[in-house]
Amino acid sequence: MFADKAKRIAIMIIGMVLLPLSVYAADNLKASLAKMPVYAESKNKGVLVDLTKAMAKELGIEIPIRVDPFARSMKNVIDRKVDFHMPLIKSPGYYKKELPYDHSTATIFHVNFVLYTNVNKPLTMDQLKTSKIETDAAHTEYFPFKTVPTNCIECSLKKVSISRIDGFIFADFATDGFLKTGKIANIKRQLYKVFDVKIILPKGERGGPIDQALSKAIEGLSAKGEFQKIMSPIDLPYNDWQP
């Protein structure tokens, strides 16, 4: 009798541990994607749209998708209107402030941040902290040195070209196109850092049911080779080409 009672208690405990994930597996998750070319152009077009649909299929659930401007999409998660947002480069933690969201356990892809300098005035990494460096306005806190915010990639590259600033650092996929036109000269490229890109979760959800469900989906897709196929257009190794 004692053995039977102990067995029933053990089953109840296991059930309580597994319940949160099983509840999410039975319900829908809601996704908010940042509206960006290639990544998510509409609810039906984009690499991250394809990833979201594949994760839903892998979990056997529905994941309604909304595509909003980046800041609004992030706010959707912070305000708990949706269960997750994609994408966001993981905060490097240079600034010890409390974030209003959590990063997922899983990494969905990587971004190559490149240092663009004047070909006649190259910089070493040690010189960055004493140089005038511009970066995209949304990414100034990703560096352990002072940077100047900008909302115009082409403008910053032109300033580098004529030595008005010492350098510009940003993602290669967003920046290289301006150099490939041949209209901006005197630029040298070099890799600054490869950043991990994460899914963003409501505060307190890292390691929780949402995070577990998304990790499970990504692991399943990876085992089949589907995850790599979906993400290959944006998860590219650094190419050390020069203009």
Image: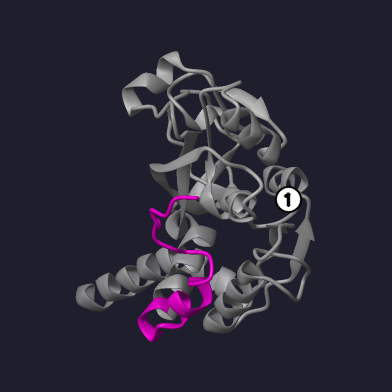
Disc 1 packing (10 Å; few <14; some 14–19; many ≥20): many
* Image location (x, y in percent) of residue 234: 53, 65
Amino acid on which disc 1 is placed: Ser
Q: Is residue 229 within the magenta segment?
A: yes
Say how the picture is coloured.
Answer: one colour
The residue furthest top is 130
| Vertical side of 104 occupied by 56: above or below | below
Q: Residue at position x 20%, y 76% from top? A: 3
* Image location (x, y in percent) of residue 235: 47, 64
The residue nearer to you, when weighing 11 against 31, is 31
Q: Which element is circle 1 on?
A: helix
Residue 201 appears in the rendering = no
The residue nearer to you, when weighing 175 against 27, is 175
Looking at the rendering, the stretch of residues picked out in magenta corresponds to 222-243
Q: Which residue is mark 1?
A: 73
Q: Is residue 5 left or right of residue 205?
A: left
The residue nearer to you, when weighing 238 against 17, is 238
Q: Is residue 44 left or right of residue 219?
A: right
* Image location (x, y in percent) of residue 111: 48, 52
Q: Residue at position x 40%, y 42% from top? A: 190
| Vertical side of 161 occupied by 42: above or below | below
Q: Is residue 34 within the magenta segment?
A: no
Count how many numbered circles sit on residues in the image. Answer: 1
| Vertical side of 189 occupied by 121: above or below | above
